[in-house]
Amino acid sequence: MNALIHRFRPLGALLLLVLLLIAPGAGLVNGYWSRTIMLIAILSLLVSGLNVVLGYAGELAMGQVALYAVGAYVAGYLGVAFGVTNVLVALAAATLAAVVVGLITGIPGLRLGGWSLAMVTFFLVTLVPNLVDIFADFTGGTLGMGTAVPTLFGMEIVGDRLYWLIILVVVGWFAVARNLLLSRHGNMFLVLRQSPILASVLGVSVYRLRLLVYVVGAIPAALAGALFSMLDGFIAPDTFTFALALSVLAASVVGGATSVYGAIAGAVVMQLGQQTFTQFQTWQLVIYGAFLLIAGIAFNRGLAGLAQDGLAAARRRGWLPTLPPASAAAAPVDDEPAARLEPLRGVLLRTEGLSKSFGGNRALDDVSIEARPGEVTALIGPNGSGKTTLLNLICGLYQPSGGRLFLGDEQIGGQPPYRIARHGVARTFQTPLIPKNMTTLAFVATGRYVTHKVGILPAILRLPKFRRGYAADDEQAMALLRLVGIGDVAGRQVDALALGTRRLVEVARSLASGARVFCFDEVGSGLDASDIAVLEQAIGMIREAGGTVILVEHNFPLVLKLADRIHVLSQGRLLASGTPAQIQADRRVLAEYTGAADGGDDGAAESVTDLEASEGPAVPKGAK
Ligand SMILES: Nc1ncnc2c1ncn2[C@@H]1O[C@H](COP(=O)(O)OP(=O)(O)OP(=O)(O)O)[C@@H](O)[C@H]1O
């Protein structure tokens, strides 16, 4: 039954599309409703563009309405000034204009960072009437501009034909958006939304990805504008108002910004609301504000989120058949033998006099260490001694104030994090960075985004290259989850997992990139004894496979078991380096941990192991 439903889903969608297309011709809807459907379709294009930018990549870009105007005027002007009325040319020109305007506004907006994009796009919307006025010779100014009748190969595209065109363009866009967002690219957009830091340590240039998302989101807005100019046959600046920008934002939030089809739900609510209530014009800003507040507080995943929750509840109760696993690889097969790691091309990592200051605080001072391939190098020290700062310098998240960082013979210190990640440096975080709305399997596969590239076009067109890449992503991610002993959580939402499990997920994610150097930041904390045993085994495997492991850890028994070499930091300086046996016997280290002036002659503890035998964290002299 289940398989049958899924097999016939595309057929159902096709039937729905055919029904929608024949509705006006077959008399199922009158002229009023066919215009309403076209307006909803156009609005859903606008909202969908915002969903891509805001819902997926987390960028508040208010400029959809300005891009809507660009699409409308470009399509309109082509017809009026050059007699180019072919709808395909008009739509292509609108798309091109969206890309150009997207780049012109996106580059400065995103380069400056922070709220700049929101500000730039906000001003873009408020500028539209002025620009239309300034270029009145081309746009007709405030009086507006009549547009030519659209054509296709000599045929006038009016009435039912225009209705079909609008429906087909909107369906086409949603197919593109679906294929893009429900792919490894969409998953990376979600990672970016949750944490640009995480995206950058996965090897992604945050700036370029943001620009890409912003430009992609601009395209449906311009297409909507072109279609609107064909529908109304007239364009005037009072269509492209700030109130419309707010209504698009409200529709995005109400429909559910992180849902592909939420845009349609949001557009339906907004358009029907507008048409149903006569007082709407007067009250529109208040109504949009109220919509945003209610949607933000009561159902922050929008109508689409409510629908998804309802469907999930119905499946749990057995009222609906359950979904098949995301992929064949995701089906839990717990009795399968754990995967083995392929050989890793570990490399020597070396710091030379590395320093980092935050204002007057010298967090790291002249630290020189080595981490060798096929070894586990542990960094220990009390809280605030500079361990995480050192990892952040190694990964490029901090710029060094002094000193150098070598990977093999190459000096990589000071490079941006995404470049360092591309050299093969992977990282986990003290507080795991985990995106929302993603399965554990998909999250682990994001580790392969840069190293096993599949372009956007193969993803949108679902080409064999995309399918092969997708299958390999799933298979590898599943094997790695099994390796760290959590294959059973592959299909679960990764942000719903317990802290200890998230740490293991991060280890699997770092392995997915095929990295050469692994920086594990307190990866053992919060894990129970059985998880620690699995972690120990996984780190042992990375070492055996030849990887370079840098382990920041407070769990001293774990450090003693795993480390080949230990570096002890104290107040940002390197206090001692040596084998576990040497560090255990080092009285300076004991003194640092106990606070005793001369290494613990009070007889309370004879070695660091005595202090840490209970697996408790190293108690700091000065807690962070
Ligand atoms: N972004 C920052 N801005 C200002 N000070 C910072 C920053 N990051 C770290 N520090 C300071 O640098 C010092 C070292 O901090 P760091 O987090 O590296 O220590 P740690 O050894 O990792 O501690 P813990 O074991 O608690 O994680 C601390 O004094 C901390 O306050």
Image (tube, rainbow, N blue to C red):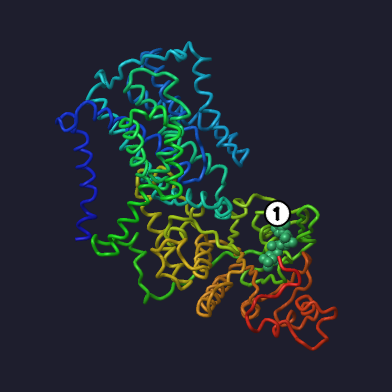
Instruction: Give the residue drawn at x 52%, y 61%.
Output: 514
| Total numbered circles | 1
Q: Would residue 127 be visible to someone looking at this image?
A: yes
Instruction: Give the residue drawn at x 58%, y 60%.
Output: 426
Instruction: Give the residue drawn at x 46%, y 26%.
Output: 241
Helix, strand or loop for disc 1: loop
| Residue 443 drawn above or below residue 465 | below
The answer to whether residue 428 is left or right of residue 414 is left
Q: Name the spot of residue 537 as percent of width and height, x first.
A: 53, 77
> Residue lying farthest bottom?
603
Name the residue nearer the viewer: 381 or 547.
381
Mark 1, other Cα within 10 Å: few <14 / some 14–19 / many ≥20: many
> Residue lying farthest left?
26
Q: Name the spot of residue 312 as percent of width and height, x first.
A: 32, 59
- The N terminus lies in quadrant: bottom left
The answer to whether residue 90 is left or right of residue 203 is left
**Residue flagged by tag 1: what amino acid is it?**
Gly
| Residue 368 drawn above or below residue 297 | below
Name the residue nearer the viewer: 611 or 332.
611
Q: Name the spot of residue 414 as percent of width and height, x first.
A: 70, 51
- The C terminus lies in quadrant: bottom right
Residue tagged 1:
413
Query: In terms of image quadrants, where is residue 332?
Result: bottom left
| Residue 595 drawn above or below residue 172 | below
Q: Would residue 350 be visible to someone looking at this image?
A: no
Q: Name the spot of residue 483 as percent of width and height, x first.
A: 47, 71
- Determine the quadrant in which ligand 1 lies: bottom right
Name the residue nearer the viewer: 144 or 180.
144
| Residue 37 drawn above or below residue 135 | below
**The residue at label 1 has a CB less than 8 Å from ligand 1:** no
The answer to whether residue 360 is left or right of residue 287 is right
